[in-house]
Amino acid sequence: MKKVFVLSLIFIFSLSATLYAFDVKGIQPVDPNGVFSTFSTESLQKNKFALSVGAELSNDPDYYRSTFKFAYGLTDSLEIDMTLPYVFGSDYRDNFEDVSIGYKHRFFGEGKYGPSLAYLLAFSMPSGGKDVSTDGRFTAGFIVSKRVGPVNGHLNLLFSKPGSGDYKNEVLFLSGFEFSAAHNFKMLAEISCKKSHFSKKVDSIEGRFGYRFKTTESIYTTFGVGTDFKNRNPESRVFFSVTFVAPAEKKKLKRIYEEE
């Protein structure tokens, strides 16, 4: 009986350790209106859409993640976003995470000195595998963006309440920067500070760096690497994504002919 009890404790601890190490993806920005996980106040034009497919490789914990993202512009300042991640690899069972749906509204435009402001509301349906799910969650966030010369900076503060009482509320602060090195090339940098669903204090401070190419008028390609400065969890990870954005309508020029 004692042996069974000890083995049960070991089994429960191993499951808890695995779940603790897992990074819940949640709602994500769709390129080019954001950095890696940092949202910009910019949104798609009315009736325009964007599709993105991404891949992520994490080292310690070891797992792979593919992410499908979609965005649609309801108006020029209101955008709907969707994120659907799929996790597979040695440390986790192959499963979808909870699908996240939300909308972002820019309610204050950028001025000469002041930033633009937006808010984000999102929810995750409890649709993922039990090993990579919080039984759904609700997210509310505040977004600030400001351009200074070739640099565009963004600040995000996001609060997420899980659907299950077994997890704690998550608080996430993001700071992202885009440097326009050329008309079709941007250098990216991001700092993420998180108090996750599995901790009472900040348990992750991660830096991410990379670049984004505007491959064509409608396609963006993004590469990046990241590492956790606090707990080395993950020790490192690599990002890659390709995004298709529906081209904007070209304005038709009307020619006026004068009668002689």
Image (cartoon, rainbow, N blue to C red):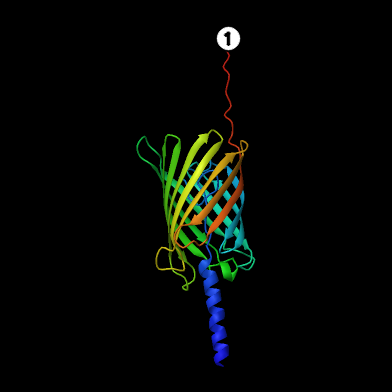
Q: Position of residue 90 (x, y in %)?
A: 63, 66
Q: Position of residue 260 (x, y in %)?
A: 58, 6
Position of 70 with respect to 115 (left or right) is right
Residue that sits furthest to the left in the current view: 113
Q: Which residue is mark 1?
A: 259
Of the pair 258 and 229, the residue shown nearer to us: 229
**Residue at the (50%, 41%) spot, across then down:** 76
Q: Position of residue 92 (x, y in %)?
A: 61, 68
Of the pair 34 and 101, the residue shown nearer to us: 34
Can you say which quadrant of the picture contains the N terminus? bottom right
- Locate residue 236: give its quadrant: bottom right
Picture layout, residue 81 above or below residue 219: below
Counting the numbered discs, the total is 1
* SS at badge 1: loop
Q: Position of residue 16 (x, y in %)?
A: 52, 74
Q: Amino acid at mark 1?
A: Glu
**Residue at the (53%, 33%) spot, across then down:** 182
Q: Residues within 10 Å of mark 1 (few under 14, many from 20)?
A: few
Position of 93 with respect to 192 (left or right) is right
Of the pair 163 and 249, the residue shown nearer to us: 163
Residue that sits furthest to the top in the current view: 260
- Locate residue 113: give its quadrant: top left
**Residue at the (54%, 91%) spot, across then down:** 2
